[in-house]
Image: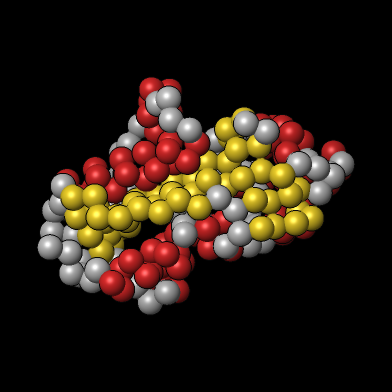
Amino acid sequence: MKLILASGSQTRQTMLRNAGLEFSVIVPDVDEAAIKVASNANTAELALELANAKAAEIAALCPWATVIGADQILVCEKRRFDKPKNLTEAAEHLRFMSGKTHGLVTAVAVHHGTKHLWHHVATPNLTMRNLKNDDIDAYLAASGNRICNMVGAYQLEGPGVNLFSDISGDFFTILGLPLLPLLGFLREHAAPA
């Protein structure tokens, strides 16, 4: 099966490689901001809508391949968060989430040509410990601008784990891809019709 990941995420690429999958990467040109503005969907539906849009765009360009699209939206107290634009905004996000539990609504969709083959949505919950401004400043100084590529302004697989007091949910999903359900689907449907 020819497999394409419709994502520029290094973390998603690493997860798939570590799972032993051979795949190509094509980054979709989906206007996520426009979809978010136009959508009246709840957060889970919106994450799936974005994952489907990414997979569908690349599947249309590469109809011979099975295409994986994914998206993740952080929601805390009914407020949706995008990736921070800069370190100042990252600090604001961390201050807002300090002492609170947030969800990482994570969607994956698989397309082949014009067919939507499968999807899965999961929402791990993470509770951030009460952070002092010095904690936030030190974390951002150590992490640098790369943290602006992370929806929560943290990277759990690094020093960001120190920001949390409790985590509930699948680790792979927290990183941005419900890997185990995806691998199960791919094993069962190795050759889409």
Image coordinates of residue 177 in percent, x first then y, are 46, 57
| Residue appearing at x 16%, y 47% in the figure | 114
- The image quarter containing residue 162 is bottom right
* Nearer to the camera, 84 or 53: 53
Q: How many marks?
A: 0
Q: Is residue 18 above or below residue 170?
A: below
User: Where, quadrant-wise, is the C terminus in this rendering?
Assistant: bottom left
Answer with left or right where residue 193 lies relative to residue 53: left
Residue 91 visible in image: no
Residue 65 visible in image: yes
- The image quarter containing residue 169 is bottom right
Image coordinates of residue 66 in percent, x first then y, are 23, 60
* Nearer to the camera, 44 or 159: 44
| Residue appearing at x 34%, y 72% in the figure | 21
* Nearer to the camera, 13 or 38: 38
Q: In the current view of this chain or complex, which residue is farthest to the bottom?
A: 20
Q: Is residue 144 above or below residue 40?
A: below
User: Where, quadrant-wise, is the N terminus in this rendering?
Assistant: bottom left
Image coordinates of residue 127 in percent, x first then y, are 73, 49
| Residue appearing at x 40%, y 54% in the figure | 120
Q: Is residue 75 above or below residue 128?
A: above
Image coordinates of residue 39 in percent, x first then y, are 40, 26
Coloring applied to the structure: secondary structure
| Residue appearing at x 73%, y 39% in the figure | 97
